[in-house]
Image (tube, rainbow, N blue to C red):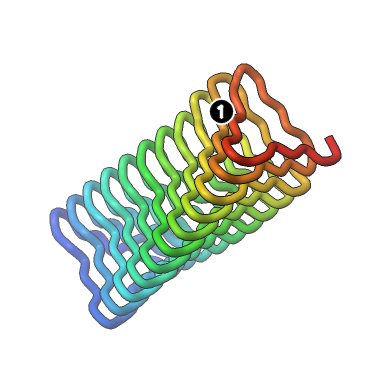
Amino acid sequence: VVVEGTAVVVAGDLVVVDGTAVVVEGDLVVVQGTLVVVAGDFVVVKGTAVVEAGDLEVVAGDLVVVAGTAVVVAGDLVVVQGVLVVVPGTLVVVEGTAVVVAGDLVVVDGTAVVVEGDLVVVQGTLVVVAGDFVVVKGTAVVEAGDLEVVAGDLVVVKGTAVVVAGDLVVVQGVLVVVLEGTAVVVAGDLVVVQGGLVVVPGGLVVVLGATVVVAGIAVVVTGNVVVVQGALVVEGA
């Protein structure tokens, strides 16, 4: 537990087995190493967890960020058999991958940002409530689950949002695909409720065997909306 202080690991690892790593109003920094939690939880409260040139891994536990920030630079963030939760906080991955296996990734009143990396959810759901989900030069992939944004925005900039065997849903928000970005849904639905679908220069929305429903505004500017074996429905435009 770090309370109003800083824990720093340089060129080494921080490992917690069958326990909990908690940062309260302080920082946990790993430089050129790995932060691993096995059969336990990793919690950040009003602080920052930073991993530079290494990995942040949680196995059979949860990663919870409350009013704080979890940052991975040039490394990976992995949660196996657990839940990644960001509550009034921020999750940032720079030049790396955020992976959740057999669990969910939930952002409540916060922001999930992937810069030049990937965000992958396998057998789970990616949910953003009252916050934003941003992919910059990266990929957001959900396999066998849903990607849901409630009261927030899903923005893809020079990246890709992919949903396989699930739905991509935006409620009271906007799905924006800009600057060579792509939103792809395979065997599922792309639904925008009380919001809009905006595709701007070079953007592409591809739906395979599904339906695009926009209850609001559908705007395409020098981009494409492609529906294969499905329908494009715009209600209340």
Question: What x and y, as percent, mark residue 49?
Answer: 36, 58
Question: What x and y, as percent, mark residue 236?
Answer: 85, 39
Q: Considering the numbered disc 1 on the image, is that residue within a helix, a strand or a loop?
A: strand
At 63% from the left edge and 58% from the top edge, which residue is drawn? 129
For residue 208, side relative to residue 27 (left or right) = right
Q: Is residue 168 above or below residue 115?
A: below
Question: What x and y, as percent, mark residue 46?
Answer: 49, 63
- Asked which quadrant contains residue 117, the reply is top left
- Asked which quadrant contains residue 87, the reply is bottom right
Name the residue furthest left.
Answer: 11
Residue 76 visible here: yes
At 78% from the left edge and 47% from the top edge, which residue is drawn? 194
Residue 43 visible here: no
- Asked which quadrant contains residue 70, the reply is bottom left
Q: How many numbered circles does the render carry?
A: 1
The residue lying toward the viewer, choosing from 197 and 27, is 197
Can you say which quadrant of the picture contains the N terminus?
bottom left
Q: Which residue is mark 1?
A: 178
Q: Is residue 116 above or below residue 44?
A: above
The residue lying toward the viewer, choosing from 90 and 144, is 144
Q: Residues within 10 Å of mark 1 (few under 14, many from 20)?
A: many
Question: What x and y, as percent, mark residue 98?
Answer: 36, 53
At 24% from the left edge and 75% from the top edge, which residue is drawn? 16
For residue 169, side relative to residue 116 (left or right) = right
At 42% from the left edge and 63% from the top edge, which residue is drawn? 123
Amino acid type, label 1: Val
Can you say which quadrant of the picture contains the C terminus?
top right
